[in-house]
Image (spheres, rainbow, N blue to C red):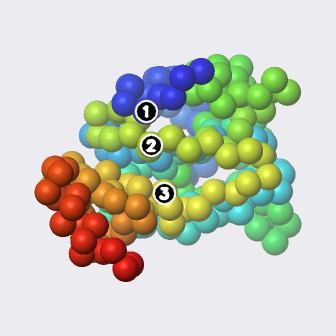
């Protein structure tokens, strides 16, 4: 499947376990328009790398909210399994009462539409950052043993919002507060001259 970046994110309707542990029987991605979205796929509940990622996103949730960004997790597990995992204490391998939706992709159509479904029937670690119009602006897919960086997701979200507000572009390793680059030949030359040693 070709990259989704620059395209509208595939919408879906599915059952999700919400922050209050209720089941939203018709959760849609399009209901989040007007907000930025970090949509991430993980292989399975009650596994190994997955809880570390989910807990890391939950720990940083306030930082995403300050950026008007909703975090949504997706796996092929049922909503009942999601809820059971939430009801399992962290010390026992659970994820506790995380505060963002977990979507049940039982028919695997969401994972398929995002190009992360493996032949064995579980999803790779795909992470998609959507702008407020629902367009995919960043896409990163890791193999199963490779956990993702929440700090990098925040950095890319900051870069996206900066470019939208200022029109400049963000060079390698850019972080909020760093110098950006004017997208002209002169701007590139000036940036490289100013940062040649750093």
Distance in Å between CA atoms under marks 2 and 3:
9 Å
Disc 1 secondary structure class: loop
Counting residues from the N terminus, which is met first, the one under dot 2 or under dot 3?
Answer: 2
- The label number, if any, that marks residue 14 in the structure image: none
Q: Residue at x 32, y 69 (%)?
A: 176
Compared with residue 142, is residue 95 higher up or lower down, i.e. above or below? below
Residue that label 1 marks? 5
Residues at discs 1 and 2 in contact (Cβ within 8 Å) = yes
Distance in Å between CA atoms under marks 1 and 2? 6 Å
Q: Is residue 53 visible?
A: yes
Q: Judge depth for marks 1 and 3 and give the one in front.
A: 1
- Choose between 28 and 47: the one closer to the eye: 47
Q: Are marks 2 and 3 in contact (CB under 8 Å)?
A: no
Residue count near mark 2 (Cα–Cα under 10 Å), binned few <14, some 14–19, many ≥20: some
Q: Percent from the top left, x then y, of residue 197?
A: 37, 79
Please identify the residue farthest to the bottom as the structure is shown. 197
The residue tagged 2 is 138
Q: Residues within 10 Å of mark 1 (few under 14, many from 20)?
A: some
Relative placement, left or right, of 68 versus 39 is left
Compare marks 1 and 3 and give the one earlier in the sequence: 1
Quadrant where the image shows the N terminus? top right
Q: Which residue is mark 3?
A: 153
Percent x, y of residue 157: 38, 55
Q: Quadrant of the C terminus?
A: bottom left
**Residue in view at x 81 percent, y 23 percent:** 119
Horizontally, residue 27 falls left or right of residue 81, namely left
């Amino acid at each position: 499947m070709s990259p989704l970046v620059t395209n509208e994110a595939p919408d879906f309707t599915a059952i999700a376990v919400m922050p209050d542990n209720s089941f939203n029987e018709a959760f849609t991605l399009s209901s989040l328009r007007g907000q930025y979205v970090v949509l991430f796929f993980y292989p399975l509940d009650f596994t190994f790398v997955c809880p570390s990622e989910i807990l890391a996103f939950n720990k940083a949730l306030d930082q995403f909210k300050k950026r008007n960004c909703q975090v949504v997790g997706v796996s092929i597990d049922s909503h009942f399994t999601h809820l059971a995992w939430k009801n399992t204490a962290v010390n026992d391998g659970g994820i506790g009462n995380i505060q963002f939706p977990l979507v049940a992709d039982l028919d695997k159509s969401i994972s398929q539409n995002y190009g992360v479904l493996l032949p064995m029937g579980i999803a790779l670690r795909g992470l998609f950052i959507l702008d407020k119009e629902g367009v995919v602006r960043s896409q990163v897919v890791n193999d199963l043993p490779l956990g993702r960086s929440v700090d990098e997701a925040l950095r890319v979200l900051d870069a996206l919002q900066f470019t939208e507000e200022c029109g400049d572009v963000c060079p390698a390793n850019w972080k909020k507060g760093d110098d950006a680059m004017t997208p002209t030949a002169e701007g590139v030359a000036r940036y490289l001259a100013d940062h040649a040693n750093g």
